[in-house]
Amino acid sequence: MLRNRLLVSILTAATLVGAVTGCSGADDAPLPLTALVLESDALPAGYTLYTQATVDELIGVNRRTLEQAETVEFRPEECRPTADADFNPRLTSENTVLLVAQSESGTLSEVVSTVVRDLGADRRATTGACRIVTAVPTRGTLATAEIVTRNTELTGPRGDFVKQSVVVRSDTVTTLGDGGVRVRSALLSNVLVQRPDGQTVTVQLNVAGPDSAVQPTAPEAIDPPLSDAEFTELVQQAAERAAR
């Protein structure tokens, strides 16, 4: 969806952050959030961590992305995404950690937060009647462009610690005002994980490929940054790590 497309493009341009693995000070103390994100050796081959930014910068990026989304028309209108508008403003550097990595084929981001995301809203915006959504920006450089996103639901993570999950592949075709066509494929997941102490955390893991120009007659040629199987296995690993 447009939200996903904007978020990935901004993350790619921004200074990005990697997470530092922590450890608890006592055997019975809960692990800190920084210990719940994926370790570098669990990342897909070719992905390199970024280590220089802060969660506060991501919060600012999210705020601007939400402001841009307000000027977009969605068809069907009921498919307008709503989960971000509730989730993102509640993120802080105290309740959220971020990991970002990049390769030649895509950008990977993982957020682990004690803010509980509305996954019901995510599901409504990406499945059923909203499996195919058209977005038309009314302002900015993409004004009048037509952005068509096709969502395919993927297998979610397994385990008693998984309370709820939404995992999709989103293939986006953008037809520009001058007739040019660009495509992007993104793999998106949101998982609510229950930790041993009963705390629920949101694990958001996304991998997005670059925008690619294609011939207008062949917009279906969209290459994902990872295979569906690779991504669902990575989501499983992320959920298991967050469940500690």
Image (cartoon, rainbow, N blue to C red):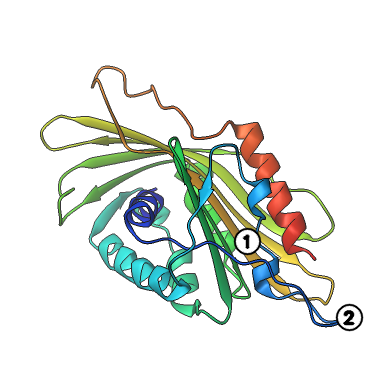
Where disc 2 sits, the SS reads loop
Viewer-proximal residue among 68 and 72? 68
Q: Label 2 belongs to which residue?
A: 28
The amino acid on which the numbered mark 2 sits, given as a three-letter code, is Asp
Residue 156 versus residue 224 in the image, above or below? below
Viewer-proximal residue among 140 and 223? 223
Q: Label 1 belongs to which residue?
A: 203
Which of pointers 1 and 2 lies earlier in the amino acid sequence? 2
Q: Where is residue 160 in the image (x, y as percent from the top left)?
A: 84, 58
Q: Is residue 69 visible?
A: yes
Within 10 Å of the Cα at label 1, are there few (<14), some (14-19), or many (20+) other Cα atoms?
Answer: many
Q: Residue 241 carries which label?
A: none
Say left or right for 234 vs 122.
right
Within 10 Å of the Cα at label 2, are there few (<14), some (14-19), or many (20+) other Cα atoms?
Answer: few
Quarter-of-image position of residue 23? bottom right
Residue 236 versus residue 150 in the image, above or below? below
- Name the residue located 75 percent from the left edge and 76 percent from the top edge: 199
- Name the residue located 89 percent from the left edge and 78 percent from the top edge: 27
Q: Where is residue 85 in the image (x, y as percent from the top left)?
A: 42, 70
Q: Where is residue 71 in the image (x, y as percent from the top left)?
A: 23, 61
- Name the residue located 34 percent from the left edge and 54 percent from the top edge: 77
- Quarter of the rendering occupied by the C terminus: bottom right
The amino acid on which the numbered mark 1 sits, given as a three-letter code, is Val
Viewer-proximal residue among 195 and 134? 195
